[in-house]
Amino acid sequence: MSAPAYAFYGDDFTGATDTLAHLARAGLRTMLFLRVPDESCLAGAGPLDAIGVAGAARSMAPAAMREELDAVGARFAALGARVMHYKVCSTFDSAPEVGSIGVAVRTLGAHFANPLRMVVGGQPDLRRYCVFGQLFAATGADDGQPVHRIDRHPTMSRHPVTPMHEADLRLHLRAQGLEDVVSIDWRAYAQDDSVLKARVDEALQPRPDALLFDVQAEPHLRAIGRLMRESAAQQPLLVVGASSVAQAWLLADDVRPGVVPRDGERVARAQGPVLVLAGSLSPRTQAQIEAAISYLRVRLEPERMTDEREGEAYLREQVNAIAAALAQGRNVLAYTDRTRIGGVAEARGNALALACGALLDGVLRRAPVRRLGVAGGDTSSFAVRALGAWAISYHASLAPGVALCRLHADDAHLDGLELMLKGGQMGDADLFERLIAG
């Protein structure tokens, strides 16, 4: 197999599928694996231009992150990848004890020795902007939605696990162990590439932990992408950021001989009942739940799902009820009670996400589901991992930042299943309805 030039690790499954979508739509042969791929998995995937691993690092403690990312870094380096993209949420929500970006940089950096370690700070198509090192995010997908500094964002400043209390990404990353992060602000892109190169060369003396790049618009990504390509050609490169890292890489390559961009594929109406599992706290997901008129709604109680004594029995009861409704041809939307989930998430760590995974696995073993949606970054990561599939490929786009993918598994009831994973901030109010209607 020829070495894939671009490798990425998604710190949750929803973000990983977004990066997969960008690369696949650009015509790159891309596969997203659900574990570090061995030779058998790679042989089954065929020749690849880009390769990814969907992980759960954003919900992990530092020790678990080091173990997982060390294996990822070693594998991608052995495959000869020129770029190692550590894909984080576009809002950079993370903390020293949970999902530490600093731990990720130091662990992966041991396998990618390029002195240039880049942090790309925005993704304009998702209304995420980095200006003079400060991160801003809109509250919605429309251009008319208000944009907030991330520490004043109505959702991300109150995230139940990793609330964003600092907008300056240099300070945010310093708290996670990256003591010296140098800002490369947008003024360095205002002229030709030589100005940006000179600014970067200056910033690398003495060697900092990372360089943080402002992003406000697509031309900024194009300039960053050219820098990435030039540096990666000399030595394999580590880059941190949202899917804007993949966008930058692609924008810098105006002509790719032999690679044909894919037209957007039409999403057909679902064949058979659709299941959605929503474990997200965001107001956007709540609006999507309220707009989902074509579903039987099943409210899940977080405390009972994670209770050591009755949790197993409660989950079995919910699995049977959901599977029975699906077997009757009804669409089902199961959602965790958002009025009570916050305290459970804080007190019981990943227990709720693991319980969601157990519920999903139980339902899919009993019901004829061929199209599935999962909402919530942590929920998606643990729920999909519980299924035992081995990879995901891109099928079509449902909304900016939301891809419909295909699951690859050895089990016949999972192989080929259409899968939508979405973060809390992604998609319009009618997203769950669109998942049925196409």
Image: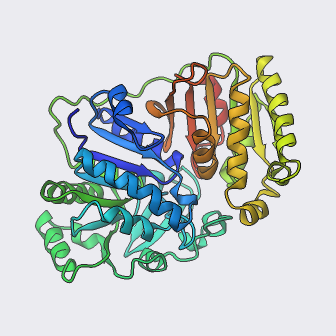
Residue depicted at 18% across the width and 54% down the height: 229
Above or below 363: residue 180: below
| Towards the viewer: 415 or 211 | 415
| Towards the viewer: 363 or 266 | 363
How far across and how far down the image is residue 431, in percent?
62, 37
How far across and how far down the image is residue 301, in percent?
84, 49
Left or right of 249? Residue 122 is right
Tell me which colouring the rendered structure shows. rainbow
Can residue 412 be seen? yes
Left or right of 412? Residue 236 is left
Above or below 404: residue 70: below
Split into 4 quadrants, where in the image is the N terminus? top left
How far across and how far down the image is residue 344, in percent?
77, 60
Residue 3: quadrant of the picture: top left
| Towards the viewer: 57 or 142 | 57
Residue depicted at 58% across the width and 53% down the height: 140
Split into 4 quadrants, where in the image is the C terminus? top right
How far across and how far down the image is residue 330, in percent?
78, 22
Residue depicted at 65% across the width and 25% down the height: 436
Number of numbered discs visible in the structure rendering: 0
Can residue 244 be seen? no
Residue 221: quadrant of the picture: bottom left
Left or right of 313? Residue 412 is left
Residue 144: quadrant of the picture: bottom right
Residue depicted at 76% across the width and 43% down the height: 335
